[in-house]
Amino acid sequence: MEEKLILAQSLKQWLAGKDSAICKILCHENIEAFCTTKFGNYIARRKDLLSFLPPGKPHEVNDDGTWKKEHRQEIKPARLVQKLLLPGVISNMGLTSKDFEEFANAVKASQVDDEDFELAFRLVQGHDIYHYYLARNYSHVHDTGTMDESCMKHSSCTAFLQVYAENPGQVSLLVLLDKENRTVGRALVWHIDPGTVIMDRIYASDSNTQMFRDYAAKQGWLYKARQCAREDEFTSPFTQLSTEQYFEVSLGIWQFEYYPYLDTFRYLDLDTGLLTNYVSRARKSWVSLYSTEGNTTKDDLVWSNHHDGYILTAGAAWVTGIGYVWINQAYQDNAGRWHLKEKIMLVDGTEHFKHECTELKGLGWIRSIDRPGYRYVKDRRRYYPLDELILVRSSRTYIHRDDAVSLPGGSICHKKNVAFIIAQGAFIPVPGNNTSSPLTVLCRQCTAA
């Protein structure tokens, strides 16, 4: 999938204030319908030219948030736009040479270096979080992206944010600020333990979202793979691989009148202050932090009488006569009905679910997958493991090793079928199985023939 074309925020802001056709295309919210990134990306003004990053070159930022100029190239404005526009756009939109000339002149007149438009990250805690959440403190110059869609940006929601402000040891807020100290982007940062820090959902424009990811990677923080709610894949700052992971945060203070809407750590145990992105055990006091009205809910949770607590709806199965149980403690029959897995103790001393096991006569319960390794012995009227048995090929039956006697020629006989031995020309009755005897052993079944 081709990357989306990224423009410097100050360039986008400038384009939005222009009335030309080319400016409207470049700042269109569905810019991918008009432009390609095969020629270049991360577009910015550089005095009377435009600069871009060629394909395959890494986009990097300085500590102050400005774009590094390494690998970037300059080009005339009209020439770059022609390279960026998809085939057919110029004719379909009715663009003329005059449109390109006017665009180039406007860029020259602006005389701005978008790459040097300063932005800075700051990690804040406690009551400072209230300030940077408020929409009235957003940047007036830069595109604030998905922050504009946040349901927690209003002053009426400030009281909902107490759980952040009162737990500075567990949660911080990473903010991207402009020169006027106004918020350009933000993301919650969770301190799980001394070795694990997680950057939560990023609220920012597309290009600034990448800045947040780069910042988190430099700090050694995990960060969300996708910027949406109820998403539990996190990207490693070291391998850049994303995996589904579950974490718990132990809050110091958690009893409040109001709570925020949480994208990731959305389940709270009101008795213990445990905050998590996944409910792994039943508890009576679980609540969901999904409301935009400041209250708690039971969304995604269902009561289980069997477990005496709330469990995740997505991880539950309904068993008739019992109610909801964890799905890993139930199994489904061919008719689609769920049944509770009954645990039993096996012959090896381990505990397994009964429906996954088989009972063998005289032996007891074994795992069903181990059934091929056992055979029934008729004369003993019970099952034995194959490694304790010998197959008598002439009768195609199994006998126990303790009952086996070797016959001339290397064949095997059950000791109960031994008739006599020949020793020094005399017939001597065999008292029992004696496979170590140097004398010839005959089988009753053989001699009867």
Image (cartoon, rainbow, N blue to C red):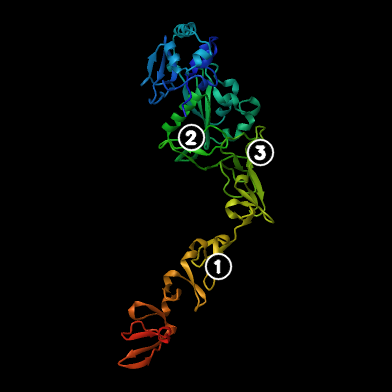
Q: Amino acid at mark 2?
A: Tyr
Q: Position of residue 166 (x, y in %)?
A: 58, 35
Q: Give the Cα distance between marks 2 and 1.
A: 49 Å
SS type, badge 1: strand
Left or right for 215, reference 188: left
> 377 or 427, which is in the foreground?
427
Examine the rendered structure and indicate whether residue 241 appears above or below residue 446. Answer: above
Q: Is residue 14 visible?
A: no
Tell me the quadrant of the picture where the C terminus can be found. Answer: bottom left
Q: Residue at x 48, y 68 (%)?
A: 374
Q: Position of residue 271 (x, y in %)?
A: 62, 46
Q: Which residue is mark 1?
A: 359
Q: Residue at x 50, y 25 (%)?
A: 206
Q: Is residue 80 visible?
A: yes
SS type, badge 3: loop
Q: Residue at x 48, y 63 (%)?
A: 370
- Which callout, 2 or 1, points at the residue further toward the start of the chain? 2
Q: Position of residue 191 (x, y in %)?
A: 50, 38
SS type, badge 2: strand
- Location of residue 256 by image quarter: top right
> 210 or 404, which is in the foreground?
404
Residue 375 is marked as none
Q: Position of residue 255 (x, y in %)?
A: 63, 40
Q: Which residue is mark 3?
A: 296
Q: Nearer the viewer, mark 2 or mark 1?
A: 1
Examine the rendered structure and indicate whether residue 72 appears above or below residue 238. Answer: above
Examine the rendered structure and indicate whether residue 270 appears above or below residue 224. Answer: below
Left or right for 332, reference 10: right
- Which callout, 2 or 3, points at the residue further toward the start of the chain? 2
Q: Amino acid at mark 3?
A: Thr
Residue 223 is marked as 2
